[in-house]
Each structure stands twice: as C-alpha cells, then as structure tokens.
Image (tube, rainbow, N blue to C red):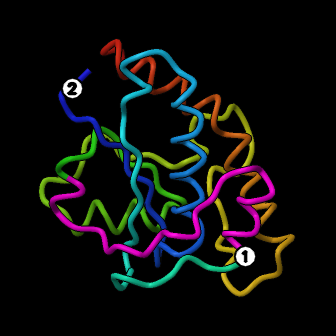
Amino acid sequence: MSEKRTLLTVCTANTCRSPMAASLLAHALAAQPEPLRSLQVISAGVAARGGEPVSANSVAAMKRVGLNIDRHVSRPLSQTLVDDALAIFCMTEGHRNMIQLRFDPPPRHLYLWREFLPAGDPEIADPFGGNLRMYESCRDEMVEAIPSLVAFLQRLRRGEV
C-alpha cells in the first residue's frame, strides 16, 4: 500500500452525505487489521464553504446507528486533500467528473461509493432538505456498500488495484 494514509469521501457541500460516509467507513475500518485500521477517513465537498455545520438530519440518522458526527464542520475540497488521499470515494458521477476536471493531474484512485457493489445504482442521491427518513435511506445505501469498500481497500493494500 502506498504511504498515503488518508481516505477521502466527497459530496457537494460536505454537510450531509460525505460526513456520514466518512463516519461509517472509519467505524468499519476500526474493526479491520492493520494497515486498514490506521487509515484516516476525512470528508470534503466539491462546492463546500468551510465551517458550515453538519445537517441536523445527518446527525440524527447517524445517532440511530450509534455514531456521532455533530462536531463536523464542512471543508472545501482542495488540491492538498486530493494529493494526500490514498483513494477518493464520491457520491455521484458528477462529483467524480468535477474532480477529474478541476485537479491536475486527476487522482488515480477516484471512485463512486457504491461502485464495487455487483448491482444497483452506484450513486447516492442528496437528501438535503428532505425528512429524516430520506437521510436514513441515504445512510442505509452507504452501509450496504461498506463490505465492498473494505474488500476493495484490501485489494488496494495488496497492490492488486
């Protein structure tokens, strides 16, 4: 595995999906053997303003599965974050396209969160402005992909990707 130790989750404003995704992935990796356990998982947004609070429904949806993200504040995606990431996981193809166009060189390991699932929509829709049930559905779509992400990261660690 590369010396890079950071995984990056990306959405639009970094107040809903990517903070939930980062928390879920960090929680899953904490149960893995080294070196996966030591990977840092952070989040950012392609159109984020720095310092915005996480959405209340994101906090509520995560608390229902025992994870607390209430201290998260938004962060814009930067060249440094992209350069320092071992892999970047986006919520939509639009996010991936924006990153490929904005950053030079485009990151090598740039994926959709649900890309490694055998079937289904690889994108995660934005729940912004929706009710708690929409946020819980978004969270559950992320949870469904966790085993495939961990398996991918194991292959990446072994240099198979």
Which residue is more in the foreground, 78 or 112?
78
Residue 146 to residue 105: above or below: above
- Which secondary structure lies at badge 2? loop
Label 1 sits on residue = 57
Question: For mark 1, does the 10 Å Cα neighbourhood hold few (<14), some (14 to 19), or many (20 or more) residues?
Answer: many
Q: In which quadrant will I find the N terminus?
A: top left
- Which secondary structure lies at badge 1? helix
Taking the magenta stretch, the answer to whether it contains residue 113 is no
Residue drawn 77% across the image and 82% down it: 130
Q: Where is residue 20 in the image (x, y as percent from the top left)?
A: 60, 59
Label 2 sits on residue = 2
Q: In this view, does 111 lie to the left or right of 49?
A: right
Residue drawn 81% across the image and 57% down it: 64
Q: What residue type is labelled 1?
A: Asn
Q: Give the range drawn in magenta.
A: 57-82
Q: In this view, does 142 lie to the left or right of 71?
A: right
